[in-house]
Image: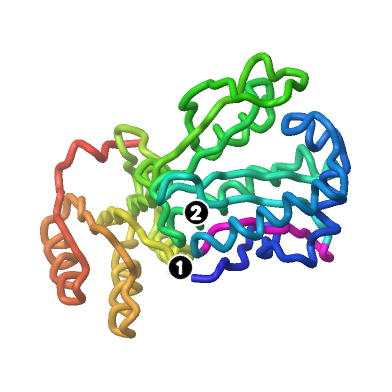
Amino acid sequence: MPQPILRTERMLLVPLEDRHLDLEAELDSDPEVLRYIDGRARTREEVVEYHEKRMELGRRVDGLGYWAAFGDGDDFIGVMMLPPAAEPGEAELGYRLLRRHWRRGLASEAAGELLRHGFETAGQHRITAQTMTVNAGSRAVLEKAGLRLVRTFFPDCPPIPGSDEGEVEYAITRAAWLARHRLVILVDDLRSFADGRPTEVARTSAEGVALLTAHRDRRIDELWLDHDLGGDDTIWPVVEVLERAAFEERPYDIGLIRVHSSNPAGAARMRRSLDRWGYPVRIVTGTAEVGRS
């Protein structure tokens, strides 16, 4: 799999190429950008050397490497990094932005997309990141992205301000990332989950249809369906969307549909309809997992 172009809400991430060398030189000419890396700006010769190393690393593992990030109008933002790590199946996350793009949430936005790509597309099982202990900004980005502190260590490197406090390593596994990104949808006019688990909730059939439409191309790990949704509203418009998708040979990717209706006849009918189209369905009427909101 070649290294792909990636997109976020505000950025286009293009696989790094030789034509981006001048942009890398611009980025690394700012000593503040490299404050927690080298403690100083890099010379053109050093930038060329690092560029060649990046290009070589980007050829080692399909899908991994470095990206030049651009905003509106080809505005260069920085270099985003997901090269292979020393261990097979592991990659190392990084990001370096021009100073004018700091404090806009762009590093977090890029980190989220690189993690998604690394786990979902490139098939990595663990992603790590390292920074100086005193680099509070970078550490906040990593923690927001779901990485957790693994260790503090003291590499044998030339001293720069703050290096006496060492470096920190963060990591996240594919299993942990998937757990953070499970998609659970609840269609119920009154109830919510008793444990407060992350959920997208629809209170009407129209809202349920809208949620299914919004997540048409994404896996839904659990879909919880009530039958009676208040007044004359029922779950059937939602069921019909699922049926139509299966009839068109593009069924929704759903791990499990849980029918938790207190209407036994309605629940049985829902199960028959969805079973017919091959959806995995379980009736869980009376479960304590769903209580009144």
Q: Position of residue 41 (x, y in %)?
A: 85, 37
Neighbours of disc 2 within 10 Å: few (<14), some (14-19), many (20+): some
Q: Position of residue 128 (x, y in %)?
A: 50, 39
Q: Nearer the viewer, mark 1 or mark 2?
A: 2
Residue depicted at 30% across the width and 33% down the height: 194
Quadrant holding the C terminus: top left
Q: Is residue 155 placed above or below 277 in the rendered structure?
A: above
Q: Position of residue 258 (x, y in %)?
A: 22, 54
> Quarter-wise, where is residue 257 in the image?
bottom left
Residue depicted at 60% across the width and 25% down the height: 155
Neighbours of disc 1 within 10 Å: few (<14), some (14-19), many (20+): few
Q: Which residue is mark 1?
A: 213
Numbered tag placed on residue 21 in the rendering: none
Q: Is residue 213 left or right of residue 229?
A: right
Q: Callout 1: helix, strand or loop? A: helix
Instruction: Depth check: give the residue in front, 259 or 75.
Output: 75
Instruction: Depth check: give the residue in front, 239 or 44.
Output: 44
The answer to whether marks 1 and 2 mark residues whose Cβ atoms lie closer than 8 Å is no
Q: Which residue is mark 2?
A: 116
* Magenta residue check for 3: no
Residue depicted at 16% across the width and 55% down the height: 263
Residue depicted at 36% across the width and 34% down the height: 196
In the image, which residues are magenta? 63-74
- Can residue 201 be seen here? The reply is no
Instruction: Depth check: give the residue in front, 171 or 12.
Output: 171
Disc 2 residue type (three-letter): Arg
Q: Is residue 23 left or right of residue 63?
A: right
Give the Cα separation between the discs numbered 1 and 2: 21 Å
Disc 1 residue type (three-letter): Thr
